[in-house]
Image: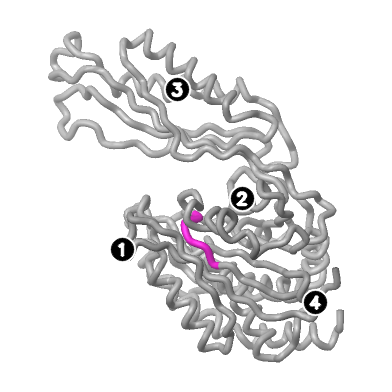
């Protein structure tokens, strides 16, 4: 690595801080919600990013759209922006996602969730950390190399995908299925979508993800005559409690992960009857399961079915279960993979710390890369505010992460 080029790049990224803040302020108000989150997709945000990159002199931009009749125009956007490196046979990829989750309960926000508010070294707003921090850092890395005229050692590509928050069918999975020639098994792939506040974790492994919908079916009656009906809500409540047994049935620990256990948590609940004095005949709730890789998802579903059968017998209800997401954990990226080593070197240089390869309980699109045989590493410097009210990103982290990406791009194979 040429220290002179590295110093120039790092200094220039510092100078781009006002530009990074302005880009964040511009993209947060563009609501990129998928149709499963009652939104219209990512097209508007993709168009903005594409035009922004062009205005910065980055011309090699391609769009790969996935057909989706659930959004206006019928297309979900995926962008790929690249600048050439000295060795065109190898590439560094940074993958970010365009979509965000809904704001949730607005009363819990201190600011408008879809306005980027700069305060005390942070930028507040929905999507600022998940995943606009990584997106902005990647764009600033592109700008620094392009505007200084410095070639990275490898081709540098940034991928902006849709649909990450609701399964990636129209995002990275679409690219892997239909445009796999974009990527090589020797590429260095970085996904800035998980991390620690000090940047000390390079994520190389993830748990399986299982989202289960439970519909409990009973018999609706007037609440004053419960003996004439079957209370679907009461049975569902007992089911929620009994599902806690999954923690014991799948009780292994793996200290590579944080938390080091499988988790089984009830989350969303749908409305049943609109009035107080009616016993509901139907009730619907969901369970979010994050399962250690040593367990098969089919094992979990078998145990869930046994638990449901016991509730059916006890309360005379029928329980229908279905899955809205079911992803078996991929094989981990080796801790000594080239991209992991390169990231650890860069983190040491920029942050002055030794990062460790670890696993996480959440899921990222890196799992899709890993299932397809690519070695992907997930890394960023974040306070873990994703999906929370008053989500924010730390401005210095956004800038320093761009420096880490730049450092990786200047390392030899």
The answer to which image quadrant residue 5 occupies is: bottom right
Q: How is the image coloured?
A: one colour
Q: CA distance from mark 3 to mark 1?
A: 41 Å
Label whose residue precedes the other's in the sequence (3 or 1):
1
User: Quadrant of the image for the N terminus?
Assistant: bottom right
Residue placed most toward the observer, 271 or 196: 271
Q: Is disc 1 placed on a helix, strand or loop? A: helix
The answer to which image quadrant residue 89 occupies is: bottom right
Q: Give the labeled residue for mark 2.
A: 368
Describe residue 255's horizontal placement relative to residue 47 as left or right.
right
Label whose residue precedes the other's in the sequence (3 or 2):
3
Q: CA distance from mark 1 to mark 4?
A: 41 Å
Q: Give the labeled residue for mark 1.
A: 72
Q: CA distance from mark 3 to mark 4?
A: 57 Å
Front label number (2 vs 4) = 4
Q: CA distance from mark 2 to mark 1?
A: 27 Å
Give percent across and percent down for residue 103.
38, 57
Label whose residue precedes the other's in the sequence (3 or 4):
4
Front label number (3 vs 2) = 2
């Amino acid at each position: 690595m040429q220290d002179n080029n590295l110093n120039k790049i790092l200094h220039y990224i510092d100078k781009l801080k006002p530009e990074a803040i302005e880009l964040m302020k511009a993209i947060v108000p563009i609501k990129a919600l998928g149709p499963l989150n009652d939104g219209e997709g990512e097209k508007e945000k993709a168009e903005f990013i594409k035009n922004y990159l062009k205005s910065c002199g980055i011309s090699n931009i391609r769009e790969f759209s996935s057909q989706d009749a659930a959004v206006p125009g019928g297309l979900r956007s995926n962008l790929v922006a690249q600048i050439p490196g000295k060795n065109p046979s190898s590439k560094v990829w940074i993958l970010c996602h365009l979509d965000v989750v809904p704001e949730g309960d607005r009363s819990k926000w201190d600011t408008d969730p879809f306005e980027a508010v700069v305060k005390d070294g942070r930028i507040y707003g929905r999507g600022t950390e998940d995943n606009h921090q990584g997106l902005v850092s990647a764009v600033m890395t592109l700008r620094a190399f392009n505007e200084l005229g410095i070639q990275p050692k490898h081709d540098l590509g940034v991928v902006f995908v849709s649909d990450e928050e609701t399964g990636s069918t129209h995002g990275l999975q679409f690219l892997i299925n239909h445009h796999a020639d974009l990527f090589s098994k020797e590429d260095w792939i970085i996904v800035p979508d998980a991390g620690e506040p000090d940047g000390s974790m390079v994520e190389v492994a993830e748990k399986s993800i299982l989202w289960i919908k439970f519909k409990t079916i009973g018999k609706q009656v007037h609440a004053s005559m419960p003996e004439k009906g079957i209370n679907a809500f009461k049975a569902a409540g007992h089911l929620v409690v009994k599902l806690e047994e999954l923690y014991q049935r799948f009780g292994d620990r793996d200290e590579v992960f944080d938390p080091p256990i499988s988790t089984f948590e009830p989350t969303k609940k749908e409305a049943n009857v609109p009035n107080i004095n009616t016993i509901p005949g139907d009730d619907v709730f969901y369970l979010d399961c994050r399962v250690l890789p040593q367990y098969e998802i089919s094992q979990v579903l078998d145990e869930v079915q046994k638990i449901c059968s016991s509730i059916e017998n006890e309360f005379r209800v029928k329980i229908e279960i279905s899955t809205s997401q079911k992803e078996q954990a991929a094989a981990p990226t080796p801790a000594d993979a080239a991209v992991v080593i390169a990231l650890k070197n860069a983190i040491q240089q920029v942050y002055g710390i030794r990062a460790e390869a670890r696993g996480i309980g959440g899921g990222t699109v890196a799992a899709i890369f890993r299932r397809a045989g690519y070695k992907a590493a997930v890394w960023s410097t974040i306070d873990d505010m994703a999906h929370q009210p008053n989500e924010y990103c730390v401005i210095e982290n956004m800038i320093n992460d761009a420096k880490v990406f730049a450092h990786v791009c200047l390392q030899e194979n």
